[in-house]
Amino acid sequence: MDVSGGDGAGREQPSETSPRAPAAARRSGRDESHEERADRRWAELLQEVRVAQTGVQILLAFLLTVVFTPRFGDLSDVNRHLYVATVLLGAAATGALIAPVSIHRFVTGWGVKPQTVTWASRCTLAGLVLLLCTIGSALLLVLRVVITDSVATLLVAGVLAWFVCCWFLPAYWMRRGGSGRGPGSGGRAVADGGNERTARAQREP
């Protein structure tokens, strides 16, 4: 019996992974629930925070010991004020970068993991901005002791511009040139695609 005739029931249908498959039927993003996506984003955030915490803690420890050095008394009033501002910025950056741990500990078991990740991400971003300001202020303080004030200001401005190019511009350009999906939308796209395929399968005889 010829199984290739009739209404095409025996004809091979293009699979989702086949190049002939429609673009709408192909899977995109990760097929994960909201809880799984929150767990993944939280694990990624912790790795990022560990790197930033190490840098700000070393910098703050160095700043706190400067006041006990013999040459601290020789600093001018401007440099002393700059030192105070640098220490305060370092302390604020440390608090912002440790905040995700505190937030997670207080709300563990309350079923608000997605919201926890959102707030922890905001605190981490604020901590990175404060860390950038701390590095710039500390660098300006050190260079003012070594070279003239005007040259020190120009050098610090150049270093801060380089930090901005490395830390923020790549992310800005990638988000601007991306598909417009924010964090967490990949799972929704997969779910929508799965619902569409299910409905189409139910309509077919």
Image (tube, rainbow, N blue to C red):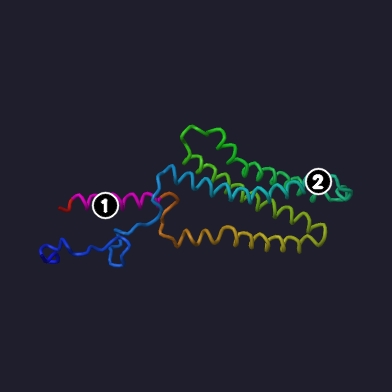
Report x, y in % for residue 86: 73, 48
142 left or right, relative to 98: right
Dot 1 falls on a residue whose secondary structure is helix
Q: Nearer the viewer, residue 16 or 78?
A: 16
Q: Quadrant of residue 64?
A: top right
Name the residue furthest right. 70
Does residue 198 belong to the magenta stretch? yes
Q: Nearer the viewer, residue 32 or 6?
A: 6
120 left or right, relative to 141: left
Crowding near the residue tagged with mark 1, few <14, some 14–19, many ≥20 C-alpha atoms within 10 Å = few
Q: CA distance from mark 2 to mark 1?
A: 63 Å
Give the main secondary structure, helix, strand or loop, of the magenta stretch.
helix
Report x, y in % for residue 178: 44, 60
Q: Amino acid at mark 2?
A: Thr
Say if 91 sits above or below 172 in the image: above
Span of residues in magenta: 185-202
Q: Tell me what residue is drawn at x 49 percent, y 47 percent.
A: 40
Q: Tell me what residue is drawn at x 41 percent, y 53 percent.
A: 30
Q: Earlier in the sequence, mark 2 or mark 1?
A: 2
Say if 22 sits above or below 113 in the image: below
Q: Amino acid at mark 1?
A: Glu
Q: Which residue is mark 2?
A: 65
Q: Which residue is mark 1?
A: 196
Evaluate if marks 2 and 1 touch, with contact meaning CB atoms under 8 Å apart: no
Q: Nearer the viewer, residue 71 or 121?
A: 121
Crowding near the residue tagged with mark 2, few <14, some 14–19, many ≥20 C-alpha atoms within 10 Å = few
